[in-house]
Image (cartoon, grey):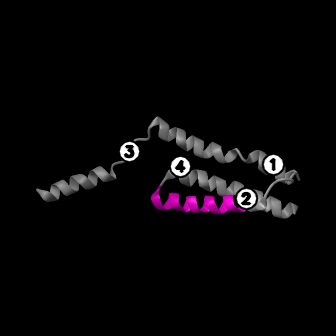
Amino acid sequence: MPHSEHLHHIQRIHKKKKASVFDRLIIVVSIIYPLSSLPQLIGVYSGNTEGVSILSWLIFLVCASLFFTYGIRHRVTPMIVANALWIIVDSTIVIGLLVRA
């Protein structure tokens, strides 16, 4: 029966895949990696803006926004999480640089 075969195919597609250890690691890394910019953020808000390029951080912000949008469109959770955090970090640094300018 072609109909039951099609139904079986649809059920296989919609089954939730169990997250592997590596998948869980990537989720953790997607949270930790953006936090690596905290020293830069703290430095900017402490008044140490020498050598910090606003153009670079604006480019980072645009790229993170594009990757975030891609992650949402393709439902890639680690990409969504990491880039949401990057948007927060990048925006905060850009604002700090504009305020300190």
Tell me which residue sits at (27%, 55%) in the image. Answer: 10
Q: Is residue 28 above or below residue 67?
A: above
Residue under label 3: 17
Q: Earlier in the sequence, mark 1 or mark 2?
A: 1
Q: Which of 5/37 is in front?
A: 37
Residue 57 percent location from the top left of the image: 73, 58
Q: Earlier in the sequence, mark 2 or mark 4?
A: 2
Residue 59 lies in the magenta-colored region: yes
Tell me which residue sits at (87%, 60%) in the image. Answer: 100
SS assignment at label 3: loop
Residue under label 4: 78
Q: Is disc 1 in contact with disc 2, using a CB cutoff of under 8 Å?
A: no
Q: Earlier in the sequence, mark 2 or mark 3?
A: 3
Give amino acid for label 3: Lys
Give amino acid for label 2: Ser
Stretch in magenta: 58-75
Quadrant location, the N terminus = bottom left
Residue 67 percent location from the top left of the image: 56, 58
Residue under label 1: 42
Tell me which residue sits at (40%, 41%) in the image. Answer: 18
Q: Is disc 2 in contact with disc 4, using a CB cutoff of under 8 Å?
A: no
Answer with left or right where residue 18 lies relative to residue 66: left
Give amino acid for label 4: Pro
Quarter of the image holding residue 7? Answer: bottom left
User: Viewer-nearest of labels 1 and 2?
Assistant: 2
User: Viewer-nearest of labels 2 and 3?
Assistant: 2
Q: Which mark is residue 56?
A: 2
